[in-house]
Image (spheres, rainbow, N blue to C red):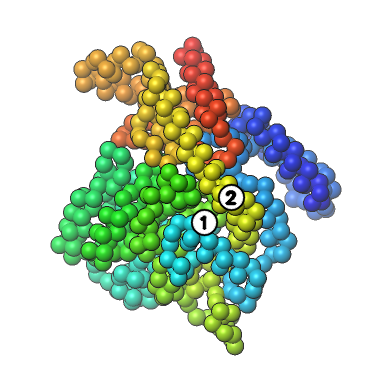
Amino acid sequence: MANAAVELMVEYLGTLRDRRLYPRTSSREIREQVDRSLPAEGTDFDQLLDVIRKPLLEFSRHNGHPRMFGYVQAPGTAIAAIADLLASTLNANLTAWRSAPAAVEIERLTIDWIKQIIGFDPNAAGLFVSGGSMANMAALVAARRAKAPAEISNEGAQSFSHALRVYASEEVHHSIAKAAAFLGIGRDNVRMIGIDERYKINLDALVAAIEEDRAAGHLPICVVANAGTVATGAFDPLAQISEIACRFNLWLHVDAAYGGFAALASTTRPLFTSIAQADSVALDPHKWLYLPVDCGCILYRDSEAARAAFAHEAEYTRVIGQEADEAFAFWDYGPELSRRFRALKVWMLLKGVGLRALGDAIEKDLACARHFEKLIKESDDFEMLAPVELSIFCFRHVPAHLKNAITRAGSTERAEAETDLDAHNERLLLALQHDGSSYLSNARLRSRFALRGCVMNYRTTLRDMEILLDDLRRVAAQIEGN
Ligand SMILES: Cc1ncc(COP(=O)(O)O)c(C=O)c1O
């Protein structure tokens, strides 16, 4: 079975670049091609693989395609797919050292490597979780335990009569507000701070919001800094935010889910100089380490602060008769009990490929985004809508008739032309996705619709960026002709 499956993998990966990136299909068509009857008897493995070939491979968006620029999507790597197969074969359950001795050591080792990659405290605690959203939630759990009265964990939010406040720029990922809602902090108690012209948090507005909340009797507990925002890739100034966090006794959490592994590229490394001062950092190896989902990571500078938040004694988890190293349990540092062996794919990738090649691939992604920005700036039919800081580029198409309206007209006509531009670019995005050669997603920047791409693929080349622009012009001509 494995041999046949690996042959299929080879066939798939070998033809990836030539596939339609996004399928032309419908929910109905796919449902019609899958036998829906509850299977009373087994089916031959070859027949199962036929279903993988079609509809599965044929009707998928191909995330490993070199011109898949949508969202924050990694391509996956073959070595990690093999690691996943081996991890599932072993079926290690990484609850605690006693349950999976060697696998737990591999996770502790790879967490140490990740700390070294970003320049974090070697004594920090950390573990793999399902993704960045879960890592952000774990960080807020630890922040609340450290900075708000401990009774909240036992007696609930009603035991404390003041609002807990969390601060982040308005560009922060929605998982922070969701986590605040789950934890009883409340979405509305995440104060969204304004941004500067580069989409980074406005530091004066941050300080003013904290002071205002303190004067109003609220309890500020945490500030979240973005190490690469999801919309534009903006990197908040960590040194200054860290100073503000210290001044007001706040937990500093850095959401590095998108940007964290840019620490491996020499041109972006300087952005990380102050990351060691963070209390927690969320990372996503399933983004810019190119790994397949799921693999997020949370690091806590003070391991005792994390333990205080997550440890919960129960007879069935009590560790009996073991020394400190072997008494170690991941359940004391995160929300999950049963945990898959995510660390194996991290270990196989880092050890099998090495940091030099990974750093070169990330540097190349950054160069692709900068190359595209240059192409757009040199063109007269497109314009950038945000600066490129990492590998995300936001821009829009400006057809000649709307360009004149925008540059020459009075304010009412200009507002109408802007609305027309939004609608035109929205249509262009859908048409591009439907076309199937390149894939972008969208963002709303200062209330304008933006085409948005993120380069996060070792297969993508500078030439792919030129093909993307050609595709956009070709598709724009098609929709204008209709
Ligand atoms: C900055 C940032 N934070 C958090 C997340 C959430 O990560 P995940 O999708 O792994 O839950 C994302 C996802 O794109 C992100 O870009």
Q: Which is more N-terminal, label 1 or label 2?
A: 2
Q: Is mark 1 within 8 Å of ligand 1?
A: yes
Q: Is residue 132 left or right of residue 418?
A: right
Q: Amino acid at mark 2?
A: Leu
Residue 217 image-quadrant placement: bottom left
Q: Residue at x 59, y 88 (%)?
A: 321
Seen as rendered, the residue at the extreme left is 215
Name the residue beneath numbered marker 2: 291
Name the residue beneath numbered marker 1: 296
Q: Is residue 192 left or right of residue 471?
A: left
Q: Amino acid at mark 1?
A: Gly
Q: Residue at x 21, y 50 (%)?
A: 205
Residue closer to the observer: 346 or 219: 346
Q: Residue at x 27, y 43 (%)?
A: 195
Q: Secondary structure at mark 2?
A: loop
Residue 209, percent from left and from top: 21, 54
Query: Mark 2 to mark 1: distance in Å?
Result: 10 Å
Q: Secondary structure at mark 1?
A: strand
